[in-house]
Image (cartoon, rainbow, N blue to C red):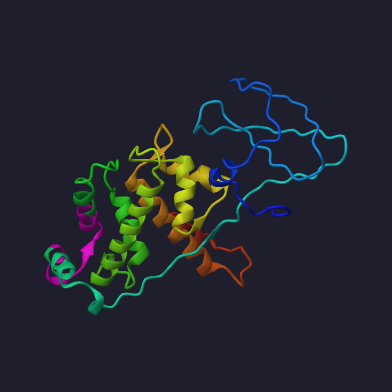
Amino acid sequence: YKGRSNVRLGPDVLLRQNSVALSDTFINTREVCSRFKLPPGEYAIIPSTFQPHKNGSFVLRVFSEKEAKTRRLEEKISAKIEEEKVSEKDIDPHFKNIFKQVAGSGMEISAFELVKILNNIVSQRTDIKTDGFSIDTGRLIVSLLDKDENGKLGLKEFHVIWNKLQKYLEIFKSHDTDNSGTMSSLEMRAAANKAGFHIDSALLQAIVNRYADVHYAVDFDNFVGCLIKLEMNFKMFKALEKEDSGKIELSLKQWMCLAIY
């Protein structure tokens, strides 16, 4: 990692390293000061809260005898979204019959019907915690996949979201390292990366503020809602971005229409 700035040093890296310096005593105090003598090189300074898995603001001051350049180690925000192409002939006949029973002769389901289906499924699972999918999450899913913009999902669109949910459930289970049935803020970052979304600390904090409960835990329905929202936001940005500039320009009407989503 020498010389790199866009990098995240996670537990998979740090837990294999020996620290070169530590504060004298690990105690719950507002200020910690220490002095170290180290050979020239690159070092990562890691602040820590006294209680694990707690978020907190901090000020880090470094005084050096000679000029020392510092920078934050952060990943760039990016996404790698895999678009699934489905033809009706590839869909299992049993899946088609189940969908037809729910959708009726119109062969389409609304956000309300989608939420009912999802909640029936997750209510039967004991290995994940959930308060149930909200109608807002259902509408978000429909908005992401509704190609003809009629506010409903057809067979192929429902098949895409079904496969996506299976993938998200697998990620959720594999990153729930403490088997709590929820996702902690630490686990959430790694899980989002596995789903193809590389996020920095500011975006992670926004996700925790929006989707976590009072104990900083994210349940399965909020986990799905978060990833669907990330995918939609990335797609919207890329559709409005000009020449890979990393910036977009919106009129008031465009901003209001996007924000109301």
Taking 257 as reference, is 186 above or below it?
above
Percent x, y of residue 253: 49, 62
As for residue 1 lying within the magenta part, the answer is no
Q: For this rendering, which residue is in front, 12 or 112?
A: 12
Residue 223 screen position, x and y as percent: 38, 48
* Residue 29 visible in the picture: yes
Q: Residue at x 22, y 45 (%)?
A: 125
Q: Is residue 80 above or below residue 200?
A: below
Tell me, yes or no, if residue 257 can be seen here.
no
Please tell me which residue is depicted at 32% across the width and 51% down the height of the picture. Answer: 136
Residue 17, percent from left and from top = 62, 41
Magenta stretch, main secondary structure class: helix
**Viewer-proximal residue, 230 or 184?**
184
Query: Residue sitting at 50 percent across and 69 percent down?
Result: 239
Residue 178's x, y, as percent?
Answer: 39, 38
Q: Is residue 151 left or right of residue 120?
A: right
- Highlighted range, magenta: 102-117
